[in-house]
Amino acid sequence: MRIDKDTWRNVLLAVLILVVGYGIVANTRQAVVDLETRGYQVRTIGGILSGVTLPVTGTTIITTTEDIPVTLDNEVVSSQPFTALAETGVTELIGADEQASQYDYSEGTEIALGGSYSGEILNVTLILSGTLSEAGTLLIFDADPSVTLADANLATASWLLAIGKIDVAAGNWFEENSGGTGAVATFAEPIAFHSLSSLWVAYYHEGSTQWNSLAADNETLDIQVEYRRDS
């Protein structure tokens, strides 16, 4: 059987497309990120892909140095499609002009995660401006606990939203010995959380000194959370 030039040309072109397609996936790792699920979709020219959804209109194309989870010609490529460790940035719990007495709560405060993630809180840092380094309890919720500043009690429904707590002793605070104007306390107490777009926190003040008892006190309490993403 004789194969004409056009047929040979088509065969060679198909082989070239397969080779080029493999090079794009294996070497430059060009991928399409599904912003809804944070999953990868692979874009290739030709090639044989197994179990991969090809790009659709409206997806965002990126080039990543991370591995892409695909099976290409029966060759499995591993993946880590997101930043595994993240931090929330500093969030205010008690402001400079907010008063809270012993056994009062701060206002329930939202800490946005920037997406819907599950994971585990690894490290919590409390940052105090002022010298009110007394005991308290930090409560962590998976939804708004509907608590306002200076509330003495949580509503019954709010307790059902709690996913963890951190006990803060007066001795946990580090402050300078020369009349400094701040203190910090860090807690490495892992607390798992299911898929959430925000964490919610509230601080329960147990010390005998009132927060901002004088207008000039300007005492503040901030929080920063470091967490590991699982999804």
Image (cartoon, rainbow, N blue to C red):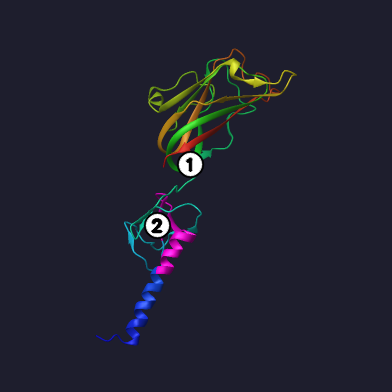
Q: Earlier in the sequence, mark 1 or mark 2?
A: 2
Element type at marker 1?
Answer: loop
**Which portion, as a residue range, is magenta?**
19-42
Residue at image position (47%, 34%) is 199
Callout 2 amino acid:
Gln
**Total number of numbered discs in the rendering:** 2
Camera-side residue: 218 or 35? 35
Residue occupying image coordinates x 36% and y 74%:
14
Residue named by callout 2: 41
Q: Position of residue 229 (x, y in %)?
A: 45, 39
Can residue 146 be seen in the rendering of this structure?
no
State the residue at coordinates (43%, 41%): 117
Residue type at tag 1: Ala
SS class, disc 2: strand
- What is the quadrant of residue 91 in the picture? top right
Task: Tell me residue 94's x, y (percent).
Answer: 59, 27
Relative image position of residue 82 (x, y in whole percent)? 47, 46
104 relative position to 217: left or right = left
Q: Quadrant of the C terminus?
A: top left
Direction front: furthest residue: 1
Extreme-right residue of the structure: 178
**Residue under label 1:** 84
Q: CA distance from mark 1 to mark 2?
A: 19 Å
Magenta span includes 32: yes
Residue 185 in the figure: left or right of residue 5:
right
